[in-house]
Image (cartoon, rainbow, N blue to C red):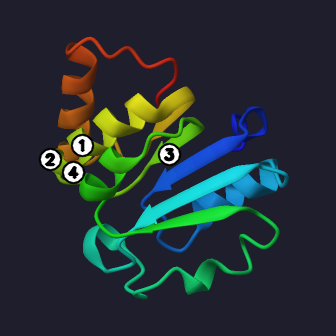
Amino acid sequence: LASVAPMAQSYIEVGVQEGRSLSVVLSAHPMLGRVTLCDTWGRVSGGSGRGTPDHLHDIVQGVQVTYLNGDSRTLLPRLTEPFDLVHIDGGHAYDVVVSDLRHGWRLCTGVLVLHDLAFAGVWNAFTEFLACGARPRSVE
């Protein structure tokens, strides 16, 4: 994330948890123009369980942030603005990852990063995604 963040002007992160990945991105590119963060803020898939994104206040100071509070399967399909950097690290269930990849790729104009390939649901969705002809410019 740190190596590709400086090339981005817009960033979306699906599955924010405690904001560690967000911190990496903003440290590498503190003047990032637009940041969108999508999370349920619950405990599912290793979430923070905090209920709100308030714990990110110090991390995002001075950055234009949009919070998408809820399930990415419902929220991402509504988005139309593109993002230079898309980071998918939300739910690890196959159906969640399929949806996040589909919509993340649709919104991506630069680099898409996929986290947690070691989980079966993530790996299966990713390999199917590639087999269906979506050839990412960059996927981790």
Residues under labels 1 and 4: Cα distance?
A: 5 Å
**Residue at x-position 26% and y-position 73%:** 44
Label 3 Cα neighbours within 10 Å, binned few <14 / some 14-19 / many ≥20? many
- Label of residue 95 in the image: 2
Residues under labels 2 and 3: Cα distance?
A: 17 Å
Q: Is residue 98 above or below residue 49?
A: above
- Label of residue 28 in the image: none
Type of the residue with mark 3: His
Left or right position of 61 against 36 = right
Type of the residue with mark 1: Ser
Q: Position of residue 82 (x, y in %)?
A: 54, 35
- Quadrant of the snapshot with the N terminus: top right
Residues under labels 1 and 3: Cα distance?
A: 13 Å
Pointer 2 with pointer 4, Cβ within 8 A:
yes
Pointer 2 with pointer 1, Cβ within 8 A:
yes
Write down the residue under mark 1: 99
Write down the residue under mark 4: 96
Left or right position of 110 against 121 = right
Which secondary structure, mark 1?
helix
So how many labels did they put on this image? Answer: 4
Which secondary structure, mark 4?
helix
**Residue at x-position 18% and y-position 53%:** 93
Q: Position of residue 6 (x, y in %)?
A: 78, 38
Write down the residue under mark 3: 87
Type of the residue with mark 4: Val
Which secondary structure, mark 2?
helix
